Image: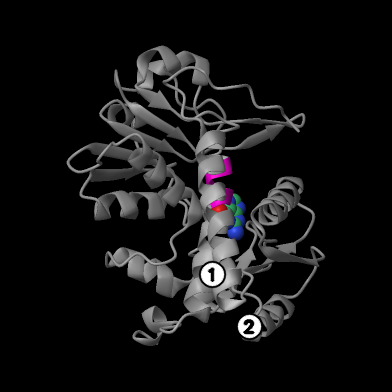
Amino acid sequence: MQQLPEVTDPRVIDGKKLSRDIEAKVKEGVLHLEEERGVKPGLATILVGEHPPSKLYVKLKHWASKRVGIYSEDHKFPETAAQEEIIELIGKLNKRPEIHGILVQLPMPKHIDERTVMMHIAPEKDVDGFNPLNMGKMFIGREGFVPCTPEGIVRALEHYDIDPKGREVVVVGHSNVVGKPAAMMLLNRNATVRICHVFTKDLKSHTTEADILIVATGVRGLIKADMVKEGAIVFDVGITWMDDKVYGDVDFEDVLPKVKLVSPVPGGVGPMTIAILMEHTLDAARMQSGKQANSLYNEIN
Ligand code: GUN
């Protein structure tokens, strides 16, 4: 795996450091929950197929669980697995009290409808925030479990004391995993948000107006210095794997002299995503074991 260089430049968002801070709090919370209620948070991951990056991400999620004291189990299916088999496993995990969070790693093979699968995760165990109930709650401004990567972006902004209210936010990429939820979460915080995507004409005319630019396309080096505004805050969420190395959507060296802040790849939003997943699993365990267990969900279900 790529070694991450020490971040010393104040313009570079140190996702590794931010994630360590989050993990330290989660670890404390896990100990406290065990002492107080005798409950150890539990996370189940589901991986279908042999997509190498997905295998690595799942492994990283289990390593993080271990670091913070969360119990985790790893469910794997072959590429050819039927959708019904996955849904059946989710049904079983939904019923197991020692499992508080369920994560289905995306992307799944083409013959599986990811949205149908996500609908079967119990909303209170949906630590990735992809169940339509949790997505819908985010849409109406009642954020519960929200997707971890956009939450990482919001948390990084909070860390730097940057209020998105009234700022021009441009999101490039309209996926359900990053682009759409990132846009919605910043809209919920009263930013002026526009979403660009593969069919957007004249991308540069939009990106150059962004105070906060979020790029999640998977097109390596798409964003160059001439496409960003002077003093912008840039989040690079793109990941392209090439010869065992990862590259972002932003030409980092090119934009660095122009920006106020930029998240690198690797070492930016990636580690934050995993730390927030740990936090969500702890939150799920707290909710499911508390006095008002699941009240957030019962009122809607
Ligand atoms: N694939 C890429 N990002 C994510 C993520 O945040 N969650 C899941 N489940 N799969 C992903």
The x and y percentages for residue 208 are 29, 25
- The residue shown at (47%, 80%) is 290
Please, what is the three-letter code of the amino acid marked with disc 2?
Pro
Please, what is the three-letter code of the amino acid marked with disc 1?
Arg
Quick one: label 1, few (<14), some, or many (20+) residues within 10 Å?
Answer: few
Whether residue 110 is in magenta: the answer is no
| In the displayed structure image, the side of residue 215 where residue 94 appears, left or right | right
Q: In this view, does 259 lie above or below 68?
A: above
Does the numbered disc 2 mark a residue whose Cβ is under 8 Å from ligand 1? no
Predominant secondary structure in magenta? helix
- The residue shown at (36%, 20%) is 259
Identify the residue under disc 1: 115
- The residue shown at (69%, 35%) is 241
- Magenta residues, start to end: 271-275
Looking at the image, which is closer to me, 156 or 208? 156
Circle 2 SS class: loop
| In the displayed structure image, the side of residue 19 where residue 165 appears, left or right | left
The x and y percentages for residue 153 are 42, 43
The x and y percentages for residue 9 are 47, 17
